[in-house]
Image (spheres, rainbow, N blue to C red):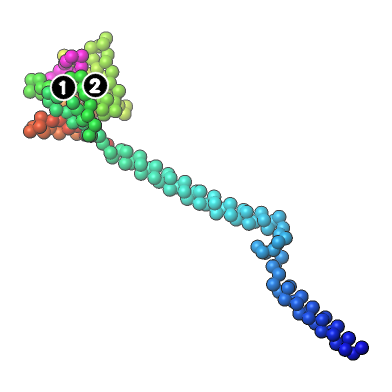
Amino acid sequence: MKKLFITAAFFLLAGYWLGGIVQASAPLPGGPDDPVVTKSYVDKVLSGGQGDIIEQIGYLQQQVSSLEAKVAELKQKVRIRIVLTLGSKTAYLDSQSKEMRVAPITKDGRTMLPFRFVGEALGAEVLWLPEENSVAYRLKGKEIKLKIDSTKGWVDGQPIKLDVPPVLLQGSTMVPVRIISEHLGAVVNWNDALQQITIIPEI
C-alpha cells in the first residue's frame, strides 16, 4: 500500500512539472503567436500596415512629382538648332535633315529666309492672309504680321519698319533674318565660311 502511494505521488509531481513547462512555453493571449486572436487585434495589425503603405505611396508620389518637374525643366532647356545654308534647300533640325521649298537667298545685301519653314520649326503657327497679302506668326501669345513687298510690319499690333520688305519666291514668303533675331526671340548666328545661318530658339 505504501509503495502504491509513493508511485501515485511521483506521477502527480511529474504531471505538475510537465504542465508548468507547457504553460511557460505557451504564447501570450492576444500575442502575435497566439492562435486565437481577437478581431480588434487583427484590425490593429492591418491598420498599422496600411498606414505604412499609405506613407510609402505618399513618398513615391512626391518623387514622381519631383521627376516630372525636372523633366519639364529639361524640356525648356533643350533647344533645337535650326541650320540653313544660302542656296541650299536642305535644312537641319539638329541632325535631322529637312527639305524646304526654296533655299535662303540674299536681297539688297540682306539674308532672306523662308518664313513658314522657320516659324513652324520654332513651333509657331504661320498663317497666310491672302485678303491682306500678308503672313502672320503666332507663338506664346505673340503675333507678328508682315505685308508682302512692304517695309511695314506689326508685332502685337505695334508697327515696326523692316530694312527690306518680305517677298514671294516660288510661292514662299521670304523675310529678312533680322525678323527672326529681333522679333521671334531666337538667337541667330552667321557662319561666313560655310554661308550658314544657325537659329537657336529662346528658352
Answer above or below: position of 110 versus 74. Answer: above
Q: What kind of residue is marked 1?
A: Ala
Boundaries of the magenta span: 163-173
The residue lying at 26 percent from left, 36 percent from top is 79
Residue 27 position within the rendered picture, expressed as x and y whole percent measured from the top left: 69, 67
Q: Position of residue 110 (x, y in %)?
A: 10, 23
Give neighbour class at mark 1: few <14, some 14-19, many 20+ (Cα, 10 Å): many
Q: Residue drawn at (71%, 59%), measured in percent from left and top? A: 37
Secondary structure found at label 2 = helix
Q: What quarter of the picture does the C terminus occupy?
A: top left
Q: Mark 2 points at which residue?
A: 116
Residue 170: percent from left, percent from top:
18, 14
Q: Does the segment drawn in magenta span residue 171? A: yes
Quadrant assignment for the N terminus: bottom right
- Please say whether residue 9 is one of the residues in the magenta stretch: no
Q: Quadrant of residue 73?
A: top left
Q: Dot 1 corresponds to which residue? A: 103
Residue at image location 14% in from the left, 28% down from the top: 85
In the figure, 12 relative to 75: above or below? below
Regarding residue 119, the answer to whether it shows in the image is yes
* The disc label shown at residue 51, or none: none
Name the residue: 71% across, 65% down.
Answer: 29
Q: Please provide percent x and percent y for residue 124.
A: 29, 26
Q: Indicate the quadrant where residue 82 lies.
A: top left
Crowd class of label 2 (few under 14; some 14 to 19; many from 20; radius 10 Å): many
Q: What element carries label 1?
A: loop
Identity of the amino acid at label 2? Arg
Determine the image quadrant of residue 97.
Answer: top left
Among the two numbered marks 1 and 2 on one chain, the one whose residue lies closer to the N terminus: 1
